[in-house]
Amino acid sequence: MTDQTEKQEQNSELEEKLRQKEKELEETKKELEKLKGEFKKMRDEWETRVQYARRSLEVTNREIAKKNKELAQKNQELSDLKEELERRVEERTKELQERVDELERYYKITVGRELKMKQLKEQVEKLKKQIKKQMNRKVM
């Protein structure tokens, strides 16, 4: 074989290799385009999910803020009611103590009168006996 024939064969082989590489390159480009499409689709799906999650979080945060506000109002109401109840208890305790003091004074007066009446009865009985004795002496 001649030099020229060898070069032609080499050229042919190189051209064949080049065609194969070009074919591989085209397939790779197609694969890459397919992967780009799939990636874009996945990215779009994730963006949609992220947006949905953000909206859900915003709604949840608003609900939590609303519930916290309601809870603060209820706590304030409870605090106000507690204070009112404590005031009423204190007032009622004072009224009851005044009533107890009044009853104790009445009891002391009543017991004092009863004791005085008992003493007077004893004195009356004693005087009756003395009078009776004196009458008996006079009669005799």
Image (tube, grey):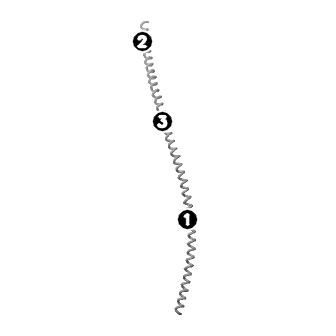
User: Element at badge 1?
Assistant: helix
Q: Which mark is residue 122?
A: none
Is residue 140 visible to the viewer in this orientation of the structure? no
Can you say whether 28 is above or below 15 in the image? above
Can you say whether 89 is above or below 55 in the image? above
Residue, disc 2: 130
Percent across and percent down for residue 83 are 48, 38
1 or 2: tag closer to the N-terminus: 1
Q: Which mark lies nearer to you, 1 or 2?
A: 1
User: Element at badge 2?
Assistant: helix
**Mark-to-mark CA distance, 2 and 3:** 64 Å
User: Element at badge 3?
Assistant: helix
What amino acid type should be assigned to the residue bearing mark 3? Answer: Arg
Q: Can you tell which quarter of the image residue 14 is in?
A: bottom right
The answer to whether marks 2 and 3 mark residues whose Cβ atoms lie closer than 8 Å is: no
For label 2, count other residues whose C-alpha is less than 10 Å away and answer few (under 14), some (14-19) or many (20+): few
Percent across and percent down for residue 99 are 47, 28
What amino acid type should be assigned to the residue bearing mark 1? Answer: Arg
Residue, disc 1: 43
35 sits to left or right of 100: right
Q: Which mark lies nearer to you, 1 or 3?
A: 1
Residue, disc 3: 87
1 or 3: tag closer to the N-terminus: 1
**Mark-to-mark CA distance, 1 and 3:** 65 Å
> Camera-side residue: 106 or 11?
11
